[in-house]
Amino acid sequence: MGLFKFNGIGIQSLSVTVPKSIVETINQTQLFNEEQLRKFIETTGVKERRIADTEVCSSDLCYDAAIKLFEKTNIEREKIDALIFISQTPDYKVPGTSIILQDKLNLSKDTLAFDINLTCSGFVNGLFFSYSLLQNENINNVLLLVGETLSKITSKEDKSTGLLLGDAGCATLLAKDEKYGASYFSLNTDGSAYKSVIVPAGGFRNMSSKYTLESKTYSDGSIRNDEQLRMDGMDVFSFAVSEIPKDVKKILNFAKMDISIIDKVVFHQSNKYMMDVIAKKSKVDLSKMIYSIHKYGNTSGVSIPSAIAEQKKSITNHDILLLNAIGAGFSWGTAILKLVDCEILDINEI
């Protein structure tokens, strides 16, 4: 059924790093006039985004977030038992970026490290894998790193993604303690829609060539090459508003909870209109919703932790959170967990 329950595992601390470079939506006049840009801002909520410099990778943002955790909390590097890196913009095709980060972060050679290839659902899935590892008696601390620099594979002249996506990285430490109580997860996959969000070329199904790097103009006026992200926004919207409310209901039933028990709701920051539609269909009180899309745009798998860090003053100790994300594939999931004594750092810039 894709439903899972854990006891005595939770988030001990969380850190987010974003690039310093700010891109304001209203100034992006290469494809849109001012009226169109204002309507885009009103609909999506994206007022500005952070875009990484050419030499900054997802791993650099995650590394900085992890370093801040080590510097500003009582985390000891030698006590990290596992490192998970989740991204679709890794440093290299080979080796895995987690392997590089183990060395760069000066973690023990006994540390288990591996990569996961997921976009927007990455954080929810990453929490699940971290919780699963922590059920092992020999694993006590897991460092979850989620980072994306989708700006590197997005055309600025693409009308579906060119104004939407931002870059960010996060580090989350998960540990064992009975104080965390019960946590619940629902994880789902439907690969029949894999073409709805895709980079058509540059992998091994359709390998890179001079032809895949040639820019093409599409019927909506978008310009991109086949090694840049293509998203069918209506496919994503239709699927999300249909399936996510069902998943929210499913996990609440599994946890034997009513939606009124939830203190804060953090959806993947896809776009504000879609989030609000899903919230209303899920009977979520909009006053409980947490947003960061206005400041960072859609940061893929980092959007949930970015929202938590950005709005940390609105979160109180022992709050029960409902998290949900949907990403390319489609891959989607929902989690219910309690934040207990969670140290949420201020968002850092590099």
Image: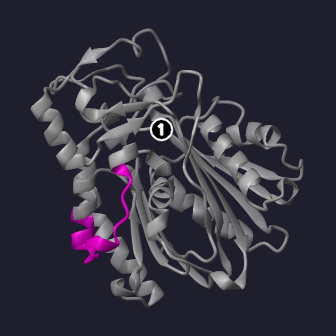
Q: Nearer the viewer, residue 163 or 82?
A: 163
Q: Nearer the viewer, residue 90 or 190?
A: 90
Stretch in magenta: 277-293
Residue located 28% across and 23% down the image:
157
Residue highlighted by disc 1: 167
Crowd tier of the residue under label 1, counting other residues whose Cα lies within 10 Å: few below 14, some 14–19, many 20 or above: many
Residue located 22% across and 71% down the image:
280
Residue located 41% across and 32% down the image:
22
Task: Give residue 57's position: percent from left, percent from top.
Answer: 59, 31
Q: Is residue 149 left or right of residue 213?
A: right
In the picture shown, does residue 165 fall above or below 9? Answer: above
Task: Give residue 244's position: percent from left, percent from top.
Answer: 32, 66
Judged from the image, the secondary structure of the residue bearing numbered disc 1 is loop
Q: How is the image coloured?
A: one colour
Q: Quadrant of residue 326?
A: bottom left
Task: Give residue 208's position: percent from left, percent from top.
Answer: 49, 18
Q: Nearer the viewer, residue 65 or 336?
A: 65
